[in-house]
Image (spheres, grey):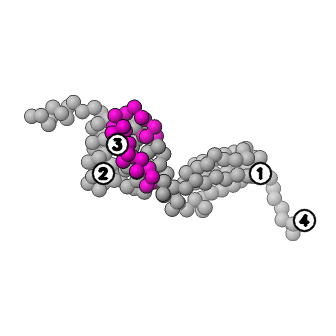
């Protein structure tokens, strides 16, 4: 009789995170991701962000995991984060071994630099540093464009 009463007393965040956790424990990480994303999107608590990050770690989505673990740790007032801070910090250290920082600069004022088509820094001499997974083939998906027409010395 107590189990149904406890289930009814669960908050919507707890229900989503329990689903996420149960699926993750069963090794169904891809299936748990939408539940964790929904919890993080709807509630954005340190606990929900950390649970999303742990799922992303299992799926080797290192840059997203680093972002969400950092955000989760920033919620210092959340009791779950306080209780699990050491484990979450350990998880962040693990993720950081898979993430590097890419910094790109140019001396062409109107150049546009994009990384995987998502991050652009137009009309600035320096882009802000970006986290990239160390295993990411970012060198094949980085592009720089400039309105300046270049000509080789042989063309003159």
Which residue corresponds to the image point at 51% horizontal and 55% vertical from the top-left?
99
Question: Is residue 71 rendered to the left or right of residue 47?
Answer: right
Q: Nearer the observer, disc 1 or disc 3?
A: 3
* Spatial separation of the CA atoms under disc 3 and disc 2: 18 Å
* Spatial separation of the CA atoms under disc 4 and disc 1: 23 Å
Sequence-first tag of 3 and 4:
3
Q: Nearer the observer, disc 3 or disc 2?
A: 3
Crowd around label 2: few <14 · some 14–19 · many ≥20 (10 Å): some
User: Splitting the image into 4 quarters, where does residue 35 fall?
Assistant: top left
Question: Where is 136 relative to 110, above or below?
Answer: below
Residue at mark 2: 24
Q: Is residue 115 magenta?
A: no
Q: Which residues are magenta?
A: 71-95
Q: Is residue 78 magenta?
A: yes
Q: Are marks 4 and 1 in contact (CB under 8 Å)?
A: no
Residue at mark 1: 107
Sequence-first tag of 2 and 4:
2
Sequence-first tag of 1 and 3:
3
Find the residue positioned furthest to the left.
Answer: 1
Which residue corresponds to the image point at 15% horizontal and 35% vertical from the top-left?
4
User: Splitting the image into 4 quarters, where does residue 9 fall?
Assistant: top left
x and y, in percent, of residue 95 in the image: 45, 54
Residue at mark 3: 84
């Amino acid at each position: 009789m107590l189990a149904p009463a406890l289930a009814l007393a669960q908050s919507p965040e707890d229900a989503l995170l329990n689903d996420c956790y149960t699926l993750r424990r069963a090794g169904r990480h891809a299936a748990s991701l939408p539940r964790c994303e929904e919890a993080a999107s709807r509630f954005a608590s340190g606990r929900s962000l950390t649970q999303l990050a742990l799922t992303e770690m299992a799926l080797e989505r290192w840059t997203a995991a680093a972002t969400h673990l950092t955000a989760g740790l920033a919620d210092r007032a959340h009791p779950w984060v306080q209780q699990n801070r050491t484990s979450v910090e350990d998880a962040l250290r693990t993720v950081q071994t898979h993430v590097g920082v890419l910094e790109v600069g140019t001396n062409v004022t109107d150049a546009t630099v994009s990384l995987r088509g998502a991050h652009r820094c137009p009309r600035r001499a320096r882009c802000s540093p970006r986290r990239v997974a160390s295993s990411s083939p970012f060198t094949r998906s980085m592009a720089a464009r400039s309105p300046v027409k270049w000509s080789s010395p042989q063309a003159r």
